[in-house]
Amino acid sequence: MQQWNFTLERQLKQSLVVRGSYVGTRGNHLFIAMDEDVAFPGPGPVPARRPYPAYASISAWEPVGISTYHSLQLSAEKRMSKGLAFTAWVHVQQEYGCGWRRQFGLSGIAK
């Protein structure tokens, strides 16, 4: 598993701070279940086209999976008088997994 991140923070005024971060990960050689008895394409019944027709299915765990994750995290904090502070943030992410399912998320909150 590889992980990396990078953050920049800047104080724009005495009471205002902004922050931007990038976070990423990558996984290699992840074990996934593979069906080793997949039927060959063509006409005819499926069991007859399988490499091992005497078996219903043959599964094996193989280290061929990969995963990646990227995210951008932005935030701003405004400090007021008497300890009161407001924070707003946005988090954008993108993931890929063994099934190559793509996800995109956006979230934010203000306190």
Image: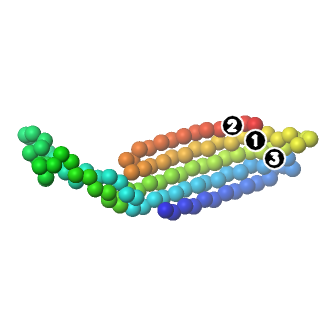
Between the residue at mark 1 and the residue at mark 3, the CA separation in whole angstroms equals 10 Å
> Residue tagged by mark 1?
87
> Residue tagged by mark 2?
109
Secondary structure of the residue carrying tag 1 is strand
Residue 51, how many percent across, how many down?
13, 53
Q: Which of marks 1 and 2 is nearer the N terminus?
A: 1
Between the residue at mark 1 and the residue at mark 2, the CA separation in whole angstroms equals 8 Å
Residue 9, quarter of the rendered image: bottom right
Amino acid type indicated by mark 2: Ile
Mark 1–mark 3 contact, CB under 8 Å? no
Secondary structure of the residue carrying tag 2 is strand
In the image, what residue occupies the spot 67% across and 47% down? Answer: 74
Residue 69, how many percent across, how many down?
51, 52
> For the view shown, which residue lies furthest in the right direction?
82
> For the view shown, which residue lies furthest in the front direction?
55
Above or below 108: residue 30: below
In the image, what residue occupies the spot 37% across and 47% down? Answer: 99
Residue 48, how many percent across, how many down?
8, 45
Q: In this view, does 110 lie to the left or right of 80?
A: left
> For the view shown, which residue lies furthest in the top direction?
110
Mark 1–mark 2 contact, CB under 8 Å? yes
In the image, what residue occupies the spot 72% across and 36% down? Answer: 110
Amino acid type indicated by mark 3: Leu
Secondary structure of the residue carrying tag 3 is strand
> Residue tagged by mark 3?
16
Is disc 3 surrounded by few (<14), some (14 to 19) or many (20+) residues within 10 Å?
some
Colour scheme of the rendered structure? rainbow
Q: Is residue 15 left or right of residue 106?
A: right
Is disc 2 surrounded by few (<14), some (14 to 19) or many (20+) residues within 10 Å?
few
Q: Which of marks 1 and 3 is in front?
A: 1
